[in-house]
Amino acid sequence: MLVLCFAVHYAFWLRVLNRSLVSPDLDERRAGLKRWVAFAVAWQAVVLLAIVAYLFPVSRSHPPGGLWIAPVLAAVVGTAVPLQVAMFRLMRALRQL
């Protein structure tokens, strides 16, 4: 789950945000940033729905121990880490303006 969430974020970041941030045109940068933010919000909603769909049946009859929560934690970390990487890239692009 961690790798899947990370890969989806990274692939979209590479295709949309990274390409638009290297453009000298400010309007293209702005449009790319809006597309990426819309994707990030939509992806967070998809991950949240997947977490709820997983937790609802599993929480009622989970096995003993804490490993049953590992997919949820992996999904959260897999979506949080790429956002941090994107923020570093955005800050670097803002300094270049």
Image (tube, helix red, strand yellow):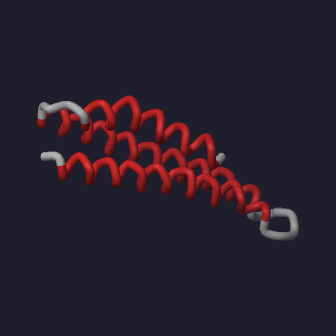
**Percent x, y for residue 4?**
61, 40
Q: Which residue is at 42% across, 43% downward?
A: 42
**Percent x, y for residue 48?**
53, 53
Q: Which residue is at 24% across, 34% downward?
A: 22
Q: Which residue is at 40% across, 33% downward?
A: 14
Task: From this view, report whether residue 72 is shown above or below residue 93.
Answer: below
Q: Which residue is at 25% across, 37% downward?
A: 21
Residue 31, by quadrant, is top left
Q: In this orientation, which residue lies closer to the viewer: 41 or 60?
A: 41
Residue 57, by quadrant, is bottom right
The number of callouts visible is 0
In the image, taking residue 45 as reference, residue 25 lies left or right, namely left
**Percent x, y for residue 30?**
18, 39
**Percent x, y for residue 45?**
47, 49
Q: In this orientation, which residue lies closer to the viewer: 18 or 43?
A: 18
In the image, taking residue 26 as reference, residue 53 lies left or right, namely right
Q: In this orientation, which residue lies closer to the viewer: 67 or 50?
A: 67
Return the residue found at the far right.
64
